[in-house]
Image: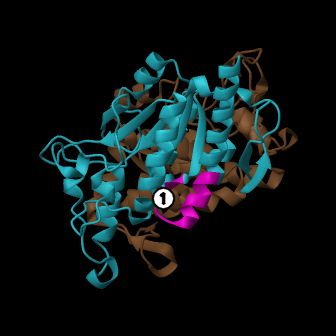
Chain colours: A cyan, B brown
Amino acid sequence: MPITNVTANVNLESVLLPEGFDDYLDLSRAVIVELDMHGGHLDPEADCPAPNARGRVLIDPINQFNAKCRELGVPVIHIVNTYRMGDFEGVDSAWRRITEGHRSMLPPEVKGPDCPFCNLALEGTKWSQLVVECKENDYVVDTKKRITAFETTDLDFLLKQLDKDIVVITGIMSDCCDLCSAYYAGSKDYKVIYLPDLTRGSSPQNEEASKLLISRYIGLVIDSEVIVEEWTQQRNRSKKN
Amino acid sequence: MPKSDIQAIYIRHAVPNNRIPVSDMLDGYFDTNKMAVLEIGMQKGNLDPDQGYLTAKEKTELIDNINSFNTSCRELGVPIIHIGAKFRVGGIDFNQAHFMRTLALSGQKAFPNPKMEEGSPLCEFAVEVKKNDYLDYSLKRYNTFEGTDIEFLLKVLKKEIIVLTGFGSDCFALGTGFAGICKDYKAILAEDLFKPYEEKLGEGTKRIFSLFIGLVLDSKDLVAELKLQNE
């Protein structure tokens, strides 16, 4: 049984996690997979290539959460989108293709100013730099080219080398990269924990939809303070022993 | 330019009926030479009313509509790939299938039907299977690329556009759609031909698909457009 009263979000309600999920909560098997907390989405300037304003509120909370995880010995992996210069790697990304295609059909007064998607995550620019703290023993996987953290990257390899099978997802966006990476992780049989208070998406409605989808088909949806408390008690217990 | 007035779901800005005409920038989605249908989960184990997922009416409606669509696709030269499961006897394919645990935690029945084991008649496809269709029974997870030869098959068929139909849009269409586009396939969700496993997740699935994965289109509109493209 969990040491603390771990609650999970099931059917959009907070419920006490029943017996049978101890393996999800094992501090020694967990790793943080933090998605896309880089300038290309979070820079506050007007020329931000693919702004996610909702995600900016996560910067301090994620920094604080990651600090606690480091104290507990839970590795932090920062996943970063990085494209080679020249806009040939990102141009065929599906979200960009359909977004630009649909926008081309809208009158200017509806769609507003165009975003310079072509600049998103270009290597060597601030758009591919993390805006959260990256500490000495953190890992950075910076070959993400599409909305999954797994394709084109060595994340799967890294998780195996670290011998971790619990993937704890934070970052942006709930209904895009987070959800896609969660489906990938679930289909690769990782245990997935999704932290809704440390993720944001395109809208509150889609954040709720992502939460429900993940809680059904992929993994556990747990608030960050709940999992940190459980891990802390596990660490304290193992120290006593 | 699209040759019909085909419209896709669009929710990023306020547009009438959340539909937007498909731009000529997206013409590449309608090339029948590069298109294949990925029809997922249309097996007796998932559809037969005595298995507890669908009523007889729901099953009949879905099968009839998909059969009709598949017929149109075959006439246009678009191959049909029926994707289903044939799990190893004894449950070993579920040893690490954590999604079964979260479904149970949510009070939902295991899906896809774990009784679709090798040798079981529940593995039979409930839709019409025609001579030049392709069958793939290696489905194991909601991302139907994982652990299967779907990607290999699409490559040898030289197909770049996947049209998704079937049962379980909220799990299979998202899992497969996300993976497909990350492998740079163009993805289309036939919104009237991919029934959600859980109805209340269907709308969210379509919204998310329309934002980040591909085009969400009515199948009749899609067929009309493809016929005009082929003229």
Is residue B37 visible in the rendered structure shown here? no
Q: Position of residue B88 (x, y in %)?
A: 70, 16
| Quadrant location of the N terminus of chain B in the rendered image | bottom left
**B63 in magenta:** no
Q: Position of residue A198 (x, y in %)?
A: 52, 51
Chain part drawn in magenta: A198-211
**A208 in magenta:** yes
As drawn, which residue projects farthest toward the bottom?
A: A109
Q: Nearer the viewer, residue B83 or A62?
A: A62
Q: Position of residue B10 (x, y in %)?
A: 45, 68
Amino acid type at circle 1 is Gly
Q: Secondary structure at mark 1?
A: loop
Residue appearing at x 54%, y 33% in the figure: A167
> Viewed as shown, does residue A40 lie left or right of A148?
left
Q: Quadrant of residue A193?
A: top right
Residue appearing at x 55%, y 46% in the figure: B173
Q: Quadrant of residue A98?
A: bottom left
- Name the residue that disc number 1 marks: A201
Q: Number of callouts in the render?
A: 1
